Image (cartoon, rainbow, N blue to C red):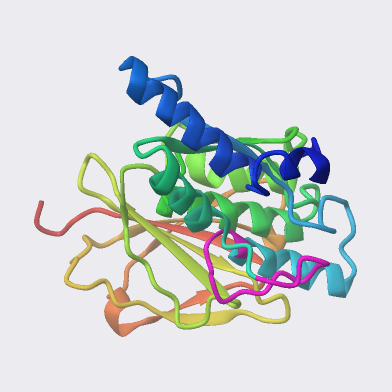
Amino acid sequence: SAAGLLDKALYGNQEFLPWFLYNVSSYDTIHNTRSLDVLDIHYYPDGLYNDQVDAETAAHRLRAPRSLWDATYVDESWIGEPVNLIPRMKKLIDENYPGLKLGISEWNFGADEHINGALAIADVLGIFGREDVYFASYWMFPPPDSPGYFAFRMYSNYDGQGSRFAGTALAAESSNWDQVSSYAALDDEGRLLLMLVNKYGVEASEAKLDLQGFEPRVPIQMYRYGESAEGFIQRSQLKVNLENTELLLPANSITLLVMEPANP
């Protein structure tokens, strides 16, 4: 903690968060009460909370969201080891104060006025949903009509009518996460929502989809934001069988497919 090593030495060299949660939990057990609902942390990946979009920083920014969930991703800063933030915090909760939810009340991966930062935002929002983060608050806010603003809108108001990427999180695997990441949800109306973030900045990527038995009604609604559409979210329709067709994803783009079930 910020109290430093001398303070840590007074408490058996325990890290602050597990020490704090364990002692509050012990107090609650003795007094038959519950003091906490959410463990709230902040997260800023080292060296990226800035507006730099040179080739090295931009590429690092698009890899950095892996630090939220990937135990094999070695942090590319002085840390030099996996952060594995969300699973690490959930394990800490399970061991010291079971039942707490996890919140991240400040986070920022930088460059939100550039498409590079928007792609990172889209990735992070998908990860927060998939990994069951109870709440998250961006610090501070992306300027209106900036790329970062539209990354948020792709999740919170993709059609301009208040429609959201929400519901029950589904497994959505990508064969090459560093190029294209994917997030899926089944909403309350039975629609399959699929968010595809193409971080490949040189050319378009072809994605072949396997919907695992979900048969969508044609046409499929598609919403897209990217370098070719800065300033607005494009809306179009797909009249193809996705399981037999490769979907072209423009370079540096965020694509949302909204799929009604063929057999409700």
In front: 153, or 34?
34
In front: 85, or 32?
32
Which residue is at a point 61% across and 79% down the rendered structure image?
204
Q: Which percent across, then down, holds residue 37?
A: 43, 26
Left or right of 194? Residue 197 is: right
Secondary structure character of the magenta stretch overall: loop
Q: Which percent across, then down, holds residue 178?
A: 60, 77
Q: Which residues are magenta?
A: 67-81
Left or right of 242? Residue 154 is: right
Q: Quadrant of the N terminus?
A: top right
Q: Is residue 113 above or below residue 67?
A: above
Which residue is at a point 62% across and 38% down the rendered structure image?
41
Q: Is residue 23 above or below residue 123?
A: above
- How many labels, in total? 0
User: Taking the image as drawn, is residue 37 in sight?
Assistant: no
Q: Which percent across, then down, holds residue 169?
A: 33, 52
Which residue is at a point 34% across and 36% down the rendered structure image?
99
Left or right of 149? Residue 193 is: left
Q: Is residue 132 above or below residue 253?
A: above
Residue lying farthest left? 263
Left or right of 27? Residue 139 is: right
Q: Which percent across, then down, holds residue 7?
A: 77, 37
